Image (tube, rainbow, N blue to C red):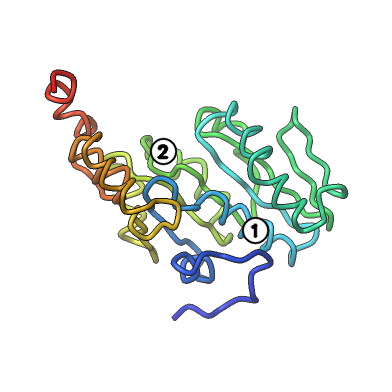
Amino acid sequence: MSSVIQKPIIQVPTFLKDAYLDQSDIVVIKAGRRTGKTYNFVTWLIQEMDSLPGEQALWVDTAQGNIQKYVDRYFEPTLKLMNHWEDTHWDKQKKVMKLYNGAIIDFGSAERPELMEGFGYARSVLNEGGLIFKKARLWDNTIYPMIKQARTRIIGTPKGNNKIKELYASNPHYTFSCYDSPFWTPEQIEIAKTQMTREAFRQEMLAEFIEGAGAVFRNINECISG
């Protein structure tokens, strides 16, 4: 049974709170587009490291080129809101962030897994799990040996049936769709239904696992000619 941690530093949307406060070692959050998963789990990671001065954490993304974008878009604004950005050091070249309390966040990517091997972490967030786990060995050979004693959050929108589905089934998990998100209006959701294939809507908006790598494109010819 999960217990509740301290009140979040920054307000968390009500629909995400159970996932945010879950203290299980590994938690998988599959969510549709624009549900606030990235922003809120950046906050989660910073809050966790706030109580672990001098410890190390890991953030994994799809590509090295995306890391600076996430620092600019999520980490910097969150730390500024907490009045800690000025005393946080971001090494853009090494992709290492030293927080105000001496805690370290290493940033790695699925495209360069060899750069992550050999370290151990107290906390980790694996972003875009549906994409990074298209290759199961990323988890089996690289990530899990480093985070087996860490509290880890795997977040992302499903992309077919790959390793994230297995991890979802074998660990505490949560699902959030566009209907849960405050960032979608009912009208926008109805429009999305008319603009996307049924499979794409189920995967990208409802966060469902869809069979087959090309499933979301089954109706592509009808969409083009329609």
Q: Nearer the viewer, mark 1 or mark 2?
A: 1
Residue lying furthest top: 225
Q: Position of residue 152 (x, y in %)?
A: 53, 57
Task: Find numbered disc 1 in the image and state the secondary structure of the residue it sits on.
Answer: loop
Q: Residue at x 50, y 69 (%)?
A: 17
| Secondary structure category for the residue under label 2 | helix
Quadrant holding the C terminus: top left
Q: Nearer the viewer, residue 166 or 5?
A: 5
Residue at image mark 1: 122
Q: Residue at x 44, y 81 (%)?
A: 1
Residue ID at (44%, 47%): 34
> In the picture provided, is 14 more to the left or to the right than 119?
left
Q: Quadrant of residue 119?
A: top right
Q: Residue furthest toward the right?
A: 87
Distance of label 1 from label 2 (alpha carbons): 21 Å
Image spot of residue 125 (x, y percent): 55, 51
Residue at the far front: name it: 187
Q: Amino acid at mark 1?
A: Ala
Q: Amino acid at mark 2?
A: Arg
Give the percent coordinates (x, y) of residue 6.
65, 76
Q: Position of residue 122 (x, y in %)?
A: 65, 58
Check disc 2 and report the residue beneath it. Answer: 137
In the figure, is residue 18 to the left or right of 117? left
Marks 1 and 2 close (CB-CB < 8 Å): no
